[in-house]
């Protein structure tokens, strides 16, 4: 701080507190609503403090689900989300780190062509090529499978770039030393490069886990089988469940359950998260 | 671009890039090619026959007032989300950069919404603003505002703008904070010695030095608003009422899956791809410049 100005200090804290309120209030209301029964939420104004139904609501959601939304227990949806997020995350990291390794440490025909092919995928998000991608997955018979849910999302230009960038900063002497010790490329990768990439992998893991967990459109298209629903996408069935009004205490409970895992990951590993976010955008 | 010291192997590098390239070819290039191809055909509803129509799908799109309105809606939506999210996060970042006490606590409380899925953010705001029992709608009524996003298209659009911006504030905040922390302290101190007050210093030093960050964030926010908010809109307003929140990505989905009009949906996909390519290009041009700074 350059100078001390009490009024400015006051304004600073006021701005921050207002910001925190704006960001936290919606989730506070979701938490509160999920602990009430349907009666408390049927008339305005709804309560701003917790009710006594929380335990009942959450146990019913986790184990039995909602009849209006196909009766799939949210616990199962969360398991599906977890499987999807983890497969996507590990898949992306695995195939990106080896392709970045090939592009940085080898010289071979079409190297740059491959690099640009990977780069171009940045420009083709699922949202803009929905129908043909769905067609391809149908032709391959991957509808309603975990493979269909995850494999099409595994290619990653961002992760490849991040690893490439990082590999370029590793001193050449390491490779020379490894070669003098007669270590081949595979040995070098496993014994030297992988351990050195640990922080990068961890930071990327957080970003990609959130990405995978929060997928919406893709599970919506690929899964018609309720046993494969994910929580982020399943909530839509409860909100827009046709003629009946949404059961808000259950909808909010599901929203809370659906955001707990990624939020916990971000808060618990804040430093790595910030590093991953800032670096993967470069 | 590449290492001076490398390994020699004929087949290993191909093996290493193989998984990534196969997935890219099958799930990115093939569908994109198909989109391009079928945008030049009109297919019957059962997919039995199709007819080459050249650019007719495109011509029809640009003659369709609904599609043009969708363009407008997308633009208004994108710019509002970007303006709201950037404005709020800049204010918060400047404040957080100044504060000494409880800085870590503030930061934690400000960044977690990044992890909330856009669909969930949308559903929660949908609940808060619900005309019959939403608490925010109730407060607005107290202020004399008649809120009903089921009927009023502008209010529905405002609802999705607020929800989308709410989720994006954390992201922008982190980048602005990083940008602020990289501004040399000596510049600010020199200006203070010359008796420039905090507001003057913000406009003449901080903001200009932040402009690369701001520009980068503007592009990222627009991309987010144009493409990632599909979930938010689909889970809440479903494009309604009366198409008021039907942005371009939502329309691609609607035309293709609900309307079953493959040719038109494909043409819309191609237009969107061109849009993403343009924006990615701008983003990378900027990054190049930042490197040479």
Image (cartoon, coloured by chain):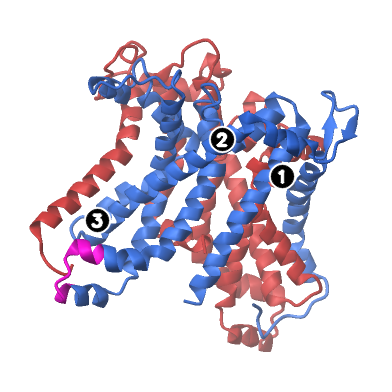
Chain colours: A red, B blue
| Mark sitting on residue B95 | 3
Q: Label 3's element?
A: helix
For the magenta stretch, what is the residue range?
A: B192-202
Secondary structure predominantly adopted by residues drawn in magenta: helix
Q: Of label 2 and label 1, which has the lower sequence position?
A: 2
Query: CB under 8 Å between callouts 2 and 3?
Result: no
Residue carrying label 2: B247
Based on the picture, tell me whether residue B200 belongs to the magenta stretch: yes
Q: Residue furthest front?
A: B63
- Position in image of residue B217 (x %, y %): 45, 56
**Circle 3 crowding by C-alpha within 10 Å: few under 14, some 14–19, many from 20:** many
Q: Classify B46 as above or below A215.
A: above
User: In terms of depth relative to the viewer, which is nearer, B245 or A56?
Assistant: B245
For the point 28% across and 18% down, the residue is A46
Residue B270 bears which disc, if any? 1
Labels 2 and 3 within one chain: yes
Cα–Cα gap, marks 3 and 1 = 43 Å
Give the x, y percent position of residue B112. Answer: 37, 46
């Amino acid at each position: 701080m350059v100078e001390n100005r009490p009024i400015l200090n006051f304004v600073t804290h006021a701005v921050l507190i207002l910001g925190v309120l704006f960001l936290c209030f919606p989730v506070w209301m979701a938490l509160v609503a999920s602990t009430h029964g349907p009666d408390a939420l049927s008339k305005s104004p709804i309560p701003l403090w917790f009710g006594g139904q929380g335990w009942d609501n959450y146990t019913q959601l986790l184990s039995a689900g909602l009849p209006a939304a196909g009766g799939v227990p949210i616990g199962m949806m969360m398991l599906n989300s977890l499987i999807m997020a983890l497969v996507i995350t590990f898949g992306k990291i695995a195939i990106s780190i080896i392709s970045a390794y090939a592009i940085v440490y080898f010289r071979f025909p079409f190297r740059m062509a491959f690099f640009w092919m990977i780069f171009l995928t940045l420009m083709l998000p699922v949202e803009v090529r929905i129908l043909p991608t769905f067609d391809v997955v149908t032709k391959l018979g991957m509808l309603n499978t975990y493979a269909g849910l995850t494999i099409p999302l595994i290619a990653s230009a961002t992760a490849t770039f991040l690893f490439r960038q990082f590999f370029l900063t590793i001193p050449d002497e390491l490779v020379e030393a490894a070669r003098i010790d007669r270590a081949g490329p595979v040995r070098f990768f496993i014994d030297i490069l992988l351990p050195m990439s640990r922080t990068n992998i961890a930071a990327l893991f957080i970003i990609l886990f959130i990405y995978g967990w929060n997928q919406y459109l893709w599970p919506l298209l690929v899964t018609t089988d309720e046993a494969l629903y994910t929580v982020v996408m399943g909530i839509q069935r409860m909100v827009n469940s046709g003629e009946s009004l949404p059961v808000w205490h259950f909808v909010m409970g599901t929203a809370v359950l659906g955001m707990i895992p990624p939020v916990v990951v971000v808060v618990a590993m804040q430093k790595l998260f910030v590093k991953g976010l800032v670096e993967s955008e470069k | 671009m590449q290492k001076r010291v490398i390994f020699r192997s004929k087949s290993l590098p191909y093996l290493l890039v193989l998984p990534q390239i196969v997935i890219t070819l099958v799930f990115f290039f093939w569908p994109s090619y198909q989109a391009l191809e079928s945008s030049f055909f009109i297919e019957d509803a059962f997919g039995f026959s199709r007819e080459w129509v050249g650019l007719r799908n495109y011509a029809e799109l640009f003659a369709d007032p609904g599609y043009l309105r969708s363009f407008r809606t997308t633009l208004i939506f994108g710019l509002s989300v970007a303006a709201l999210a950037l404005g709020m996060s800049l204010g918060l970042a400047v404040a957080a950069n100044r504060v000494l006490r409880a800085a870590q606590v503030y930061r934690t409380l400000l960044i977690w919404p990044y992890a909330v899925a856009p669909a969930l953010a949308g559903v929660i705001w949908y609940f808060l603003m619900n005309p019959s029992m939403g608490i925010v709608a109730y407060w607005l009524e107290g202020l004399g505002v008649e809120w009903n996003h089921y009927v009023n298209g502008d209010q529905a659009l405002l609802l999705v703008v607020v929800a989308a911006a709410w989720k994006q504030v954390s992201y922008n905040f982190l980048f602005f904070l990083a940008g602020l922390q990289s501004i040399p302290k000596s510049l600010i101190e020199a200006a203070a010695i010359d008796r420039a007050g905090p507001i003057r210093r913000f406009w003449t030093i901080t903001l200009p030095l932040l402009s690369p960050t701001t520009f980068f964030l503007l592009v990222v926010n627009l991309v987010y608003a144009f493409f990632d908010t599909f979930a938010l809109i689909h889970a809440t307003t479903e494009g309604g009422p009366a198409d008021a929140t039907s942005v371009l990505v939502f329309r691609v989905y609607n035309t293709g899956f609900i309307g079953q009009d493959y040719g038109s949906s494909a043409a819309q996909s191609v237009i969107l791809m061109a849009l993403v390519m343009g924006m990615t290009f701008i983003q990378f041009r900027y990054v190049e410049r930042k490197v040479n700074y």
